[in-house]
Image (spheres, grey):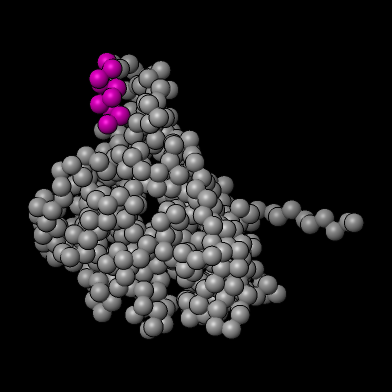
Amino acid sequence: MDFDYGEAAEKFRIEFRNWLEDNLDPDWRDRVGDINLDNPAAGADHPWLREWDRRLYDAGYKGIAWPEEHGGRGMSLLEQVVFHEELVAAGAPVVANFLAETLLGPTIIRWGSEAQKERFLGPILRGEEFWCQGFSEPNAGSDLASLATRAVRDGDEWVVSGQKVWTTNAQFADYCFCLARTDPDAAPHKGISFLLVPMKQPGVTVRPLLQPTNTDEFNEVFFDEARCPAANVVGGENNGWAVAMTTLGFERGSSVTTQFLTYERELSEIVESARARGLLADPVVRRDLAAAHTKVAIMRANAYRTLTALTTAGADLDEAGSGFHPSLNKLFWSEYHQWVTNLAVNLRGPEALVVGDGYRVTSQQFAFLFARSETIWGGTSQVQRNIVGERLLGLPKEPKPEKNTQR
């Protein structure tokens, strides 16, 4: 592994760290952990988060990976990694329009028409239009190609009908980048289009889903003959699967080294909680905390190994969404996080079962409850194991049940 980020990246680190010290309000740091607790939409509609986005934009720190001709900074991979590392180290908020900036914007840059780039990229960076992602459906999660939402051409528009689910912050969205079946007679992967659907119109209903965390950032979205301009198809009609795979590749992002930093901070808080309760002398507690430390160290090593491979090969992290490595990493961190949040709750004892007035959970309670979903979203653990078994270990593909043709 190569731990040298290089002169340019370290110079940018100092620049951005100094800017954060001057521009990140101390009370914002204190409120980052409470975003989910204070606002049912995971903070997306917090005015101070919108202000934070604006400060980043005005200083030229929005779209740092985007090419300069599209309003970004065109930064190298290592500079992008440094950017995310410094945000985590400073305890800074995430950007309010995260899905649009990290997923949709790069997808439009790669697949969009010049008119689409001109129309959508600027408002995304400036935070003028808020976006949600319409991929998953009640019967199409990990098996995304089985989606049933359909779009029928009507002159210069598509008429969209169907249902999406687990749609983050849809209640605040102006647009949804949505997958819909535009050719029902084509093979499952071939008849899908990538549409940019306006949300503020008749025919679009958003129903928030209240979770055990007492938040409802996830939503059901119902399209009942909603309208989408024909010009809002990205990448060409019936080519949505290829476009969507690009989008999911961007989901890996340049934050490859920041996940373990977040888990290091969380583990430090768990250790302090155990110390405050006089539990560190307990050999079982010490064993479990040592195991947690080891697992985070494994994530750190894998992160730097991945970063070294990418920089050595000259690869782009945005194209690292294929193969088995992302599946291996996702399987490891999601199951670790369930385990370690369970440990944190156990260390707190009966106190962990008590919530505040109005069902206000603590940050550790929130992490415990939310971690239950992490082995599901982004690809279930079962799917990740299949990918690792087939692509890494060369095992035969899982047999599919035969269809019952008897009447």
Task: Return the residue found at the far right.
Answer: 407
Query: Can you tell which quarter of the image residue 223 is in?
Result: bottom right
Query: Is residue 405 inside the magenta stretch?
Result: no
Query: Can you tell which quarter of the image residue 122 is in?
Result: bottom left
Asked whether residue 230 is in view, the answer is yes
Query: Is residue 271 inside the magenta stretch?
Result: yes
The residue depicted at 79 percent of the width and 57 percent of the height is: 403
Circle count: 0
Report the quarter where the C terminus lies.
bottom right
Q: Is residue 339 above or below residue 257?
A: above
The residue depicted at 48 percent of the width and 81 percent of the height is: 231
Q: Nearer the viewer, residue 223 or 340?
A: 223
Is 308 placed left or right of 156 in the picture? Answer: left
Asked whether residue 291 is in view, the answer is no
Is 306 placed left or right of 185 in the picture? Answer: left
Which residues are the magenta region? 269-278
Q: Nearer the viewer, residue 34 or 285?
A: 34
Estimate the x, y position of residue 286 in percent, counting from the top left: 32, 23
Estimate the x, y position of residue 35 in percent, counting from the top left: 32, 43
Estimate the x, y position of residue 25 in percent, counting from the top left: 15, 47
